[in-house]
Amino acid sequence: MPTYDYKCDACGHAVEYFQSMSEAPKKKCPKCGKSKLVRQLGTGAGILFKGSGFYQTDYRSDSYKKSASADSSSSSCSGDTKSCAANGGPCAS
Ligand SMILES: [Zn+2]
């Protein structure tokens, strides 16, 4: 299972999550509680999300949602119903 690096756009808190490929990206910052987490595209990739970078992340999230809903309608919720709903997961409906 790959590790994803996230950084909070609000408070700058950095955190790592183990996630499956079909799992919706995390949004909620565990430190400040705001839905400002931005997933980093791997360490050493040379891509930094600063300023307008979040547009790219939003685009990625959209395609992620589509593939996630196509893949599995019920198994992408990890039990965190709040972030699940916030990410358009099965708990949103
Ligand atoms: Zn934060």
Image (tube, grey):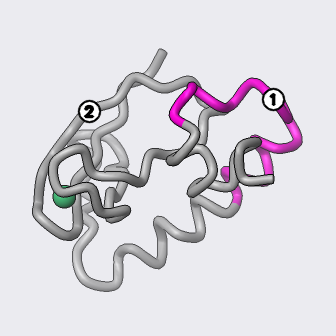
Camera-near label (2 vs 1) is: 1
Q: Does 77 lie within the magenta span? A: yes
For disc 1, the marked residue is 74
Q: Looking at mark 1, is its residue's CB closer than 8 Å to ligand 1?
A: no
Q: Is 37 displayed left or right of 70 in the figure?
A: left
Residue 56 x %, y % = 48, 71
Q: Does 41 lie within the magenta span? A: no
Q: Residue at x 67, y 51 (%)?
A: 64
Q: Nearer the viewer, residue 70 or 49?
A: 70
Q: Which residues are magenta?
A: 63-80
| Number of numbered markers | 2
Considering only vertical position in the picture, is 74 above or below 50? above
Q: Where on the picture, by quarter, is residue 11?
A: bottom left
Considering only vertical position in the picture, is 3 above or below 60? above
Ligand 1 image position (quadrant): bottom left
Q: Residue at x 88, y 41 (%)?
A: 70
Q: Residue at x 65, y 31 (%)?
A: 77
Q: Nearer the viewer, residue 45 or 20?
A: 20
Q: Is 7 displayed left or right of 11 in the figure?
A: right
